[in-house]
Image (spheres, rainbow, N blue to C red):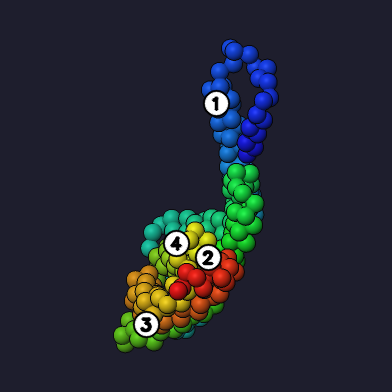
Amino acid sequence: MRLRPPRKKGMMDHRGPDHPPEADAESSLVEHLLELRTRLLRALAGLALVLLVLLPFANKLYAWLAAPLLEKLPAGGQLIAVQVASPFFTPLKLAFFVALLVSAPWLLYQAWAFVAPGLYQREKRLAMPLLVSAVALFYAGCAFAYFVVLPAVFGFLTAIKPEGVAMMTDINAYLDFVLVIFLAFGASFQLPVALVILVSLGWVTPEQLRAGRGYAVVGIFILAALITPPDVISQLLLAIPMCLLYEAGIAASRMVVPRDKDASAGT
């Protein structure tokens, strides 16, 4: 996206009296729309390419995703397919989600390339680290959910099931459950980025974030109880990292606001 530079004062206009100024605005709008279309097509092409690469491994991806539950089930325990087409569509659904996750940097880059020309230098210097941090934190949240949360949750659920009850989970229901966990933890790990954005916009200061730490901890535990399954294990495994990420967000926000400004705002 390229913005038309303004004419300098005193520069003669050679366009003539028959050239309306609305033509320039219309031309600029068309250029922006063409640029947007190009970026969207590139983003979709990258996503489709990753999806085509992952489709032959869809069943293996699902077997890898189901491992935390299968390892906690008794001997002979397995997942079932309630619907006839579930064995076909469920791995495809997982492959699309993984493709979206893998191609996220490419998709964000296309969005950045479209928006960046209209930003100031200070906004560019701040936005790029925030985008990289957001992607890295989302990946970290998904990894934490897979390697720590899911084994703990399934171990707890299989341990408390009533005697004589066999856990036979539908493959599509299991995928939906795991995707919700991934999205919840990936989004919750964006807390430091959100705090830095709030501070950079001037809505809060690092001193106010420190002063409201107690309220934030209560809110974090309430949020963890709402977005996690109804068990204490998953709630604690989400609330504790978010409390640590809140402290990391305070530390990162101090890099955005100068110390003298932060101190003057806290007095």
Q: Is the residue 115 above or below the residue 7 in the image? A: below
- Label 2 belongs to which residue? 196
Mark in the foreground, 2 or 3: 2
| 49 relative to 179 in the view: left or right | right
- Label 3 belongs to which residue? 232
Mark in the foreground, 1 or 3: 1
How would you rate the neighbour count of disc 1 (Cα within 10 Å): few for under 14, some for 14-19, many for 20 or more? few
How would you rate the neighbour count of disc 4 (Cα within 10 Å): few for under 14, some for 14-19, many for 20 or more? few
**Percent position of residue 163, x then y:** 31, 87
- Gap between marks 1 and 4 measured at Cα: 36 Å
Q: Amino acid at mark 1?
A: Glu
SS at badge 2: helix
**Percent position of residue 206, x then y:** 49, 71
Give the mark, 2 or 4, whose residue is nearer the N terminus.
2
Q: Is residue 202 visible?
A: yes
SS at badge 1: helix
Give the mark, 4 or 3, whose residue is nearer the N terminus.
4
SS at badge 3: helix
Q: Is the residue 117 above or below the residue 58 in the image? A: above
Mark in the foreground, 4 or 3: 4
Disc marking residue 138: none
- Label 4 belongs to which residue? 203
| 135 relative to 236 in the view: left or right | right
- Label 1 belongs to which residue? 26
Q: Nearer the viewer, residue 38 or 28?
A: 28
Q: Amino acid at mark 2?
A: Val
